[in-house]
Amino acid sequence: MADTILVCGHGPGISDAVAQRFGKAGHPVAIVARNAERVAAAAKSLVDAGVNAKAFPCDLGQPEAVKKLVADVRSSLGPIGVLHWNAYVGGAGDLTTATSDELHAVLSVTVYGLVAAVQASLPDLKAKKGAVLVTGGGFCFYDPNVDAAVAQFHAAGLAIGKAAQHKTVGILSKTLSADGIYVGEVVVTGLVKGTAFDSGNATIEPATIADRFWQLYQAREPATVTI
């Protein structure tokens, strides 16, 4: 039986496609989001599609809650062989008005929660030679044109969070490779259909990104790809 995949930050786009892709390949799927009702409904849809899935409501910006989440998933579905981090937080869009609480909330989800999940899952990931898969965003890049777009669209918090997460992924990749753990990231540079950012002009199919994650999981290289 394939190892459990823990999908953190579940929504109707990328993460649901990842849950379907891995679930249909035989991986038990734990999907996580703050809204208990929504994540329960999403788990039911996956089960109806033939996936062994369970819902776990959790605030992924609270490291202690994340640690408990990992323990609950392990107890319910078995050892965690794959951790998929898809969570993000909006807010802090304009750095001239953003509060320190808004900035803290961004980093709590994109970095602190991710690190807590990795640490809590580490015994399983080491034993299974598992993988950490992270959804990145194009605003993470250090480029004047990107920064101009971030300022124009008031997306400073998202950009800062994804930039910090991008660096975190790189460091984790180098750190965990010695234990046989693969850490990889798909940096999404366009709008994805079915997500909160899709106002009708999105061009990227969630399944395309899920397939790229599956390819990375199988090949275990490189650490970062852009789509």
Image: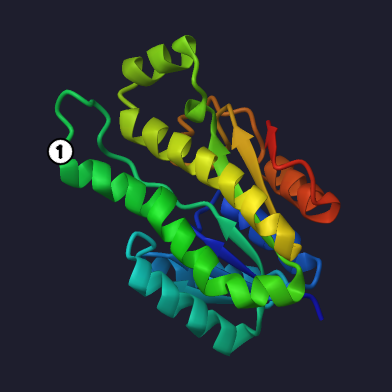
Image coordinates for residue 31, horizontal then vertical, percent: 54, 68
Position of 137 with respect to 64 (left or right) is right
Q: Quadrant of residue 151?
A: top left
Q: Dot 1 corresponds to which residue?
A: 99
Q: Which amino acid type is marked by label 1?
A: Thr
Q: Nearer the viewer, residue 1 or 131?
A: 131
Is residue 210 visible in the rendered image? The answer is yes
Number of numbered discs visible in the structure rendering:
1
Which quadrant is home to the C terminus? Answer: top right
Q: Quadrant of residue 150?
A: top left
Image coordinates for residue 73, horizontal then vertical, percent: 54, 80
Position of 122 with respect to 1 (left or right) is left
Image position of 42 with respect to 190: above or below: below
Residue at the bottom extreme? 75
Image position of 173 with respect to 81: above or below: above
Position of 182 with respect to 136 (left or right) is right
Which quadrant is home to the N terminus? Answer: bottom right
| Residue at image point 54% right, 64% down | 118
Q: Residues within 10 Å of mark 1 (few under 14, many from 20)?
A: few
